[in-house]
Image (tube, grey):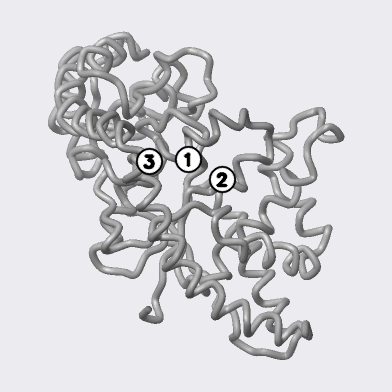
């Protein structure tokens, strides 16, 4: 492996959607062209909240299918599921003993996910950021693609790496992973409420475009997507109070690989029916083939299992080499 190494993961919680594609998968495919990459189905993270075992098993394979259907190549990237490499859990425990309580108490995502009933939340959900740090540091990854909601966790990973290096007097043993932030990427928001992130957990299926949606479903959802009565205007500041309008313009821009200012000029003065028609067209062109490939791949589970098995073998070689040195540094016999 070359020195520069990218690590990222996706939780297998079912129904990959447009937000997953534009926020992660599209970028993953781009990165594998120029960098060494490990892409992980993070099933250990998934069980921080209870998962039905049969559904989890199916979702791990479906997420793997989503990786492949989006363009990830197991010959170019290492694709595997987290629980198959025991080093993730082993290093997470070591890092639990390096991380400080005060650092975890500052993690805003735990507060958001646990809500008012944080005393009933699992310990796993609380120490989830330490497992994320272990995922990255196990492979000595140098770069991590992150969105705004994960940036704080990556900063924690850097703090943990720095403290480990200092505590055990091994300067630069763990590299301090750097964030890879996509240019011109916007958060994909709900089609029903432009102030909320597109989510598989939102009750209405009309709030998101699923990667497995048919062409007809995509067109129907975009037609019903919430907008406003005002036309498309040139001043981008006008959209600060028009979240649904901005969301559709952003999605079109991301799919077209162009700046939002270019999209605004393209539809300037037109109403949203024009944008919706073109957006439906480009979504069907981009997403429908992915959905068809996912369905096809899910009919050959043996192939998906083989991809994960080969990925596990490759990941395990790197993980075990690093763990051998980590155990020695910590003082284990």
Label 3 vs 1, first from the N-terminus: 1
Q: Nearer the viewer, residue 250 or 221?
A: 221
Give how far apart the Cα atoms at labels 2 and 3 are. Answer: 26 Å
Residue 172 placed where, x, y %?
59, 86
Q: Are marks 1 and 2 in contact (CB under 8 Å)?
A: yes
Residue 39 placed where, x, y %?
42, 56
Q: Secondary structure at mark 2?
A: helix
Label 1 vs 2, first from the N-terminus: 2
- Between circles 3 and 1, the one closer to the viewer is 1
Q: Nearer the viewer, residue 299 or 35?
A: 299
Task: Please state, as top left, top right, bottom left or bottom right, where the N terminus lies in the image.
Answer: bottom left
Residue at the (57%, 79%) spot, across then down: 322
- Give the labeled residue for mark 3: 186
Residue at the (34%, 69%) spot, across then down: 36
- Left or right of residue 216, residue 123 in this image: right
- Give the labeled residue for mark 1: 60
Q: How many marks?
A: 3
Q: Secondary structure at mark 1?
A: helix
Residue 136 placed where, x, y %?
55, 65
Give how far apart the Cα atoms at labels 1 and 2 are. Answer: 7 Å
Q: Is disc 1 surrounded by few (<14), some (14 to 19) or many (20+) residues within 10 Å?
A: many
* Quadrant position of residue 6: bottom left
- Give the labeled residue for mark 2: 43
Q: Which mark is residue 96?
A: none
- Left or right of residue 302, residue 176 in this image: right
Location of residue 120 with respect to 129 vertically, above or below = above
Q: Are marks 3 and 1 in contact (CB under 8 Å)?
A: no
Q: Secondary structure at mark 3?
A: loop
Give how far apart the Cα atoms at labels 3 and 1 are. Answer: 27 Å
């Amino acid at each position: 492996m070359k020195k520069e190494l990218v690590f990222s993961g996706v939780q297998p919680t079912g129904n990959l959607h447009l937000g997953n594609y534009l926020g992660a998968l599209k970028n993953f495919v781009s990165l594998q062209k120029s960098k060494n990459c490990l892409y992980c189905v993070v099933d250990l993270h998934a069980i921080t909240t209870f998962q039905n075992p049969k559904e989890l098993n199916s979702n791990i394979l479906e997420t793997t299918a989503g990786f492949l259907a989006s363009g990830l190549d197991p010959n170019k990237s290492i694709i595997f599921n987290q629980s198959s490499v025991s080093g993730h859990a082993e290093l997470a425990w070591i890092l639990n003993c390096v991380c400080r309580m005060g650092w975890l108490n500052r993690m805003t995502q735990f507060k958001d996910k646990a809500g008012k009933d944080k005393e009933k939340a699992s310990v796993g959900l609380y120490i989830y950021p330490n497992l994320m740090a272990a995922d990255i540091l196990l492979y000595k990854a140098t770069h991590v693609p992150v969105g705004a909601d994960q940036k704080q966790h990556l900063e924690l990973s850097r703090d943990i790496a720095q403290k480990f290096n200092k505590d055990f007097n091994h300067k630069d043993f763990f590299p301090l992973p750097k964030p890879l932030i996509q240019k011109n990427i916007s958060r994909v928001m709900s089609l029903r409420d432009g102030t909320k992130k597109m989510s598989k957990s939102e009750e209405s299926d009309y709030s998101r475009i699923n990667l497995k949606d048919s062409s007809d479903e995509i067109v129907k959802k975009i037609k019903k997507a919430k907008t406003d009565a005002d036309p498309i205007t040139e001043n981008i500041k006008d959209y600060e109070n028009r979240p649904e309008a901005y969301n559709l313009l952003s999605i079109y821009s991301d799919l077209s690989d162009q700046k939002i200012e270019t999209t605004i000029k393209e539809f300037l003065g037109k109403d949203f029916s024009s944008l919706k028609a073109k957006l439906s067209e480009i979504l069907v062109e981009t997403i429908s083939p992915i959905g068809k490939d996912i369905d096809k791949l899910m009919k050959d589970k043996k192939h998906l299992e083989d991809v994960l098995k080969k990925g596990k073998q490759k990941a395990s070689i790197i993980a075990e080499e690093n763990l051998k040195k980590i155990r020695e540094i910590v003082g284990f016999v």
